[in-house]
Image (tube, rainbow, N blue to C red):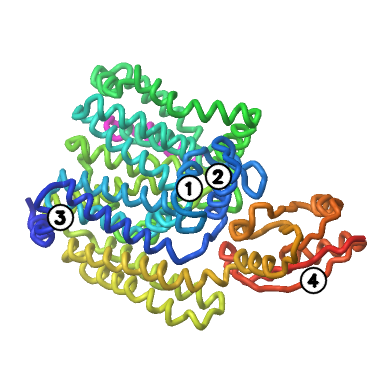
Amino acid sequence: MTADSTLLGTAFGRVVTASAMREAVAIGLAALALFLASSAGAPVMGRDESRFAQASREMLARGDLVVPTFAGADRYDKPILIYWCTMAAYALDEVDARAARLPSNLAGAAVVALVAFVARRRHGPGSGLLAGGLLAATPVFAFESEACTADLVMLLPLTAMMLALERLWLERGGRGAAGVFWAGLALAVLAKGPVAPAVLFGVALAGWAMTRPWTRAEVVAAVILAAAGWWRFGPAVLVIPLVAATIAALRSAELRRRLAALRPMWGIPMLLAITLPWALAAYRATGGAFYRVGVGHHVVERSLSPLESHGGFPGFFLATGPVAAFPWFALALAAAFAARKVSRDAHTVFLLAWLLGPLIVFEMVRTKLVHYWMPSYAAGVLLAVAWLLAGPVRPRRWAAWVTAFGGLVLAVAPVAIVVHLGLGRLLPTAIACAVPAAAAAIAAGIWLHRRPLPALVAAAAGSLLWLLLVAVLLLPALGPTFSGLRAAQALLAARAPGETLAVYRARDDDVFFNLPLDTVHCHSEAELEALLSRGRPVVVVSRAEDLDRLRADRPELTLRVVTEVDGVDLGRGRWVRSVVFRPEGR
């Protein structure tokens, strides 16, 4: 045991002397408390969270367990698991933002506990608290653990699947590990479709690539293939090395033995038994549209073109990693650079494959968001912790500078947002949020090269405090300014008895979560005119520019403005104006 690991065990010894399970439970409960506290104050926000929360609300109201809808229209973006989980939370509590986020809160805490348990068993007392704390302090992971999205509901079974796969690959797992692998894969598919198979695909290819000799010609061919994938063809180009890896596996008795450890003869039927009931029900209920849209649009098109302006450049995830995966990102890279003789350490091979394989796959996907690489975060944390605790380590200065840069960006972010939006009254709050991240950056910049473990712990503590202050102080103060919430409040205040509520050309998806379920969404002028033709009184809210366009296109309509309200469009980072009006006929 190294001096750092001895120090770590001494520091946390009284907490963790009993078992790895107790250490994992302790950090898991602490993470859960953080996520719950951070989820309680802010309203539902953003496009994705609003759509998942509202779709689950609509499904619960009509008792539908098969087809999600948003504002009355079929929603085919993601499979069903997140909706089931959110519906269960609503049924147990009430339909509000806190209940909507509860599945992600629980899943995030469980992933933290799982990573902590593995680290503690491998590296001794205190290492579980370190690994779990680093993961909980990771900004992207924490934010997703505090949001009603599919990512953490997918990440929990995926992480369990990958850890079971490692045990099976190292020939240390039996039927139980194989069952966890197939069940985890099935649940991850039900949560986010092809993401888990893509991660598995990337890990398998990376593991194969790292355990074979390479000629210079093969290296050149691999570079050309990767460039072609990013330029035009997406992850489909990886079929070529997949075929080569499959042939190698079939020729190798050792690889065949390891693949047999997965027990595919009963594992694949288990996978199908978990996924097929809903898959067939969704196919029948939608006439196959769920898969034409969900796979054709959201998988194939997302791979080949940047949907919804979410494009990215080569190296996108490495460029955003210092902030998204603060404070362990640079240390994970340093550990990867240090592991040059990876064939001697099977654990390191697997963690490197888990870290780098999905990175290559997601770099070839043309649509890029920072959280896409999150399925590899557990590997990055475990790799960094293993490297720090394995022996005397002095990271190079670049690792300290990269980590300090990530902390400084975190510190500046809330201040920049408040200044950009012109919310001077919130500037003291934003500055207070910035202080711990700035302190974490300073600690990393000064001490990470000399005393990496204390500096990393200090940086993680600063990141955790920053996350808590942003969620508890800043977001609840920003929440009342959101344009969707303000538009919904204005519409409800203007409603007269017997009037139908309507939203015209909704640009703020959170508006629907703050309105009754019978609110009508008019996507077009024709739909608004059809609503008016019913003869019932209607009060409508829309963006000011959409009302101006409607007046220009339909001058025969009398559109009387009731009230106007300004709010923050968080996705676009600007103030916008919404208008409540009454159409009074031709």
Please state which of the two labelled residues, at mark 2 or mark 4, is closer to the viewer.
2
Contact (Cβ within 8 Å) of mark 4 with mark 3: no
Q: Residues within 10 Å of mark 1 (few under 14, many from 20)?
A: few
The tag earlier along the polypeptide, 1 or 3, is 1
Q: Give the x, y percent position of residue 274.
A: 43, 28
Compared to 229, does 129 lie above or below? below
**Crowd rating for badge 4 (residues with CA inside 10 Å; few <14, some 14–19, many 20+):** some
Say if residue 425 shows up in the picture: yes
Q: Amino acid at mark 2?
A: Leu
Residue corresponding to mark 1: 91
**Which range of residues does the magenta coloring cover?**
210-228
Query: What percent of the width, then of the height, locates residue 332?
Result: 28, 52
- The residues tagged by marks 1 and 2 sit, at their Cα atoms, a distance apart of 8 Å
Q: Earlier in the sequence, mark 4 or mark 3?
A: 3
Q: Secondary structure at mark 1?
A: helix
The alpha-carbon separation of the residues under discs 4 and 1 comes to: 38 Å
Q: Amino acid at mark 3?
A: Gly
Secondary structure state at the residue bearing disc 2: helix
- Mark in front: 4 vs 1: 1
Q: Which disc number belongs to residue 126?
A: 3
- Mark 3: which secondary structure? loop
- Mark seen at residue 561: 4
Question: Residue at position x 22%, y 63% from top?
Answer: 457
What residue is shown at x 15% (from left), y 56% (from top)? 393
Question: Which numbered marker is on residue 60?
Answer: 2
